[in-house]
Amino acid sequence: MNLLLRGFEDFGQYLILLRRSFTGLLRFRLYWQLWTYESIQIGRDSLLLVAIISFFVGAVTTVQTAYQIVSPFIPKSTIGAIVSTSAILELAPTITSLVLAGRVGSSIASQIGSMRVSEQIDALEVMGINSATYLLLPRLFGAVIFFPILVIYACFIVHLGGIIAGAFTGAVNPTQFAIGARSFYEDFQIVFMIIKAVTFGFIISTVSAYQGYYVKGGALEVGNASTRAVVISCLMILAADYVLAQLLL
């Protein structure tokens, strides 16, 4: 019972923080500078990690799919169709977002949490600055804008990893892979992938900011807040993944 009440209390504080973040806006130039910095942290600094993980996800998915297709009557192009559809609908948006929840989410929570325990947030409030807007809004916009870019980039790398693994192992050649990928492609799959990326970016940025913003204590509590931000973000991503699939597919 106490856990349920604590959950409702946290959700209420989370909604209040979201509402506060869109009130008392400051000068556009200041937001532009903050957004540019956060975009570099979220986007550019994640490219290598996303590329490595996506490449091996595509390679492993291709090899395992080829392993399961043992019938000679099933065309090799089926491997490309399965890998491509899985990459667009699930592998690229969900796996990438789960990875970014650990890298981006923990960073946001620790940064804001450190500002809270060192009383920098209190100093912003004393100066008349809406700390919720100042801290959350640039990170939210950075995540919502750059998560779709990273997911599209990850989708391309997954396909590349699948093609290279298929050619290297002899499971499927690039031409067969491309024929299969095109045969089951639909434009709405890309729209669905982008919707998921925007939703997951919103979840990670706001949940992590909330965990950091309401930290109480010292360095140990900041670390715990970072851990909670990653765990809760991952759980909410998986729940939102199911809800979006149920509603849109």
Image (spheres, rainbow, N blue to C red):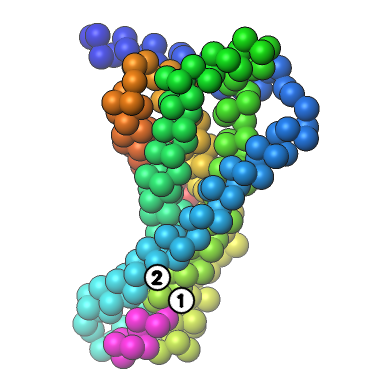
Q: On screen, 236 above or below 103?
A: above
Q: Which residue is mark 1?
A: 160
Q: Is residue 68 left or right of residue 205?
A: left
Residue at image mark 2: 55
- Image location (x, y in percent) of residue 17: 54, 18
From what the image shows, is residue 124 above or below residue 185? above
Q: In this image, 153 relative to 237: left or right? A: right
Label 1: element kind = helix
Which residue occupies 25% across, 14% down?
Answer: 3
Q: Is residue 244 left or right of residue 23?
A: left
Q: Residue at x 72, y 39 (%)?
A: 32
Q: Position of residue 7 (x, y in %)?
A: 34, 16
Please state, as top left, top right, bottom left or bottom right, where the N terminus lies in the image. Answer: top left
Quadrant in the rendering for residue 132: top right
Tag on residue 148?
none
Q: Tell me if residue 94 is in the magenta stretch.
A: no
Q: Amino acid at mark 1?
A: Leu
Query: In front: 109, or 174?
Result: 109
Q: CA distance from mark 2 to mark 1?
A: 7 Å
